[in-house]
Image (tube, coloured by chain):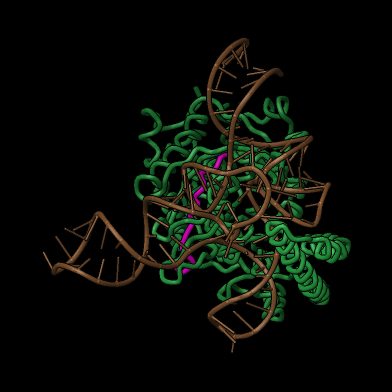
Chain colours: A green, B brown
Amino acid sequence: MLDIQLLRKDLPAVVAGLARRGYALDEAGFRTLEDERKSLQTRTEQLQAKRNALSKEVGARKSRGEDASSVLAEVAGIGDELKANEAALSALQGRLDHFLRTLPNIPRADVADGKSADDNVEVRRWGVPRAFDFPVRDHVDVGEGLSLLDFETAAKVSGARFSILRGHLARLHRAIAQFMLDVHTREHGYTEIYSPYMVSGECADGVSSLAKFKDDLFKIEGRDLYLIPTSEYSVTNFVRDVILEEKSLPLKFACHSPCFRSEAGSHGKDTRGMIRQHQFDKVELVQIVHPERSAEAHEELTANAETILKRLELPYRTMLLCTGDMGFASARTYDLEVWLPGQNAYREISSCSNYEAFQARRMQARFKGGDKGRTEPVHTINGSGLAVGRTLVAILENYQQADGSVVVPDALRPWMGGVERLARA
RNA sequence: GGAGGGUUGGCCGAGUGGUUUAAGGCACCGGUCUUGAAAACCGGCAACAGGGCAACCUGUUCGUGAGUUCGAAUCUCACACCCUCCGCCA
């Protein structure tokens, strides 16, 4: 949510900022709502003040044993108008709030303008894609060839966009998650978190816009609960309605969880394999930081995620998303794209975003500042560190051998109980 | 599923219709004292919204929502959540 003060003080700047990401703010609509709100609020508060003063007078007279009937008669006249004003004001503020919650975040100045992923900017590239001296297969052929990856049974059990891992491949999946968690908690200072896989609608609206994106989520029937599409949904909400001590910042959380996405808008996209599933695991990094440190923390968190790719020796590139390709809540986003030989392309494996105060305002997450002692919204940052399923895909494709086996990356061996290669039994 | 208890500021906690302008304590901030610190003492200290250049003023908020009333933390109703006991259960 944007700061409504900014809209009041400098609407043209907000309009211009949102236009950069292709969002047309209804300027006249906002002005109308805001003007109406102002007059209605002024009038309502005058009436309330009058009623409060008169009611106090009633009490004062009665305690002195005097007659209060003249005051009672006066205050009685206020009742209907006050009620009508209060109702109208509350309805109007509801509309204003809805309007405000529908607006996306304003991109930071150093984000390139653009319309689509084609306009994203490559900021760095690491590793060299391996040269294969045999026909490269994608992860589906590799996994199924080893009888360790099974989409047919998954389809029977749950339908499309699910997968089943067996044996050493399932173990590799677990090893990846544990490796990532251990690196982030031992080396990068994150606190390990286990948290709910379902959150309330209110919390969902705290990190994004529930009104806009509820079709992308799985909802529990008959309950105000949604399956998380990322543990960001539960973890970031730890600080909902909290006023933090300045010295307690930053908070750094690492959480491994499954993620559930309806993929409502992606029919026909990535239908083959594990790239786009209704359920996948992810190790999520979340930082709650002081506003002055957020740009720096965003770089740090992105580097933390990149560390995983480097340790796994997977070639990747880091993209700074353009204004048109960023998510609703983000002010600035890096995508990490891993090299997939099976697709002969770099594919997203992590998305690291700085939301600045956007989410914090939606969920009333604040800290009490030092000198001024004022409360202000914290900044929130998060990113995948990394998506476990896509990491598995990248390993199957990058570490495949001519004989159909897959070498386990050195970095994962401590978690593989001596297994150095996935091969046919 | 059954029965009971509870939800008050950053935290603890008093408060059953009108000097509550939410007592008191803790924490925090400033000061006095001290070589320094602690202790003691003095003072300050809720959030959110609106108005004002500002000192400041007004409003809302005591789990949420509705109601009664001139006036509600306090009374009524509904709901949510937490706790205890019983039953069932991984």
Q: Does the magenta stretch include residue A69?
A: no
Instruction: Give the main secondary structure of the magenta stretch.
Output: strand
The image quadrant that residue A69 belongs to is bottom right
- At x 35% / y 49%, what residue is drawn? A187
Is residue A150 depicted above or below A230 in this figure?
Answer: above
Q: What x and y, as percent, mark residue A165?
A: 57, 29
Is residue A133 depicted above or below B48 in this figure?
Answer: above
Q: What x and y, as percent, mark residue A342?
A: 59, 46
Is residue A278 depicted above or below A61 in this figure?
Answer: above
Q: What x and y, as percent, mark residue A399?
A: 47, 42
Q: What x and y, as percent, mark residue A248?
A: 41, 55
Asked if residue A341 shows in the view, the reply is no
- At x 48% / y 30%, what residue is drawn? A171
The residue range painted magenta reads A281-293
What residue occupies the far front of the structure in this picture? Answer: A65
**In-front residue for pair A51/A45:** A51
**In-front residue for pair A271/A360:** A360
Q: How many labels does the image show?
A: 0
- At x 64% / y 53%, what residue is drawn? A206
Left or right: B80 in relation to A232: right
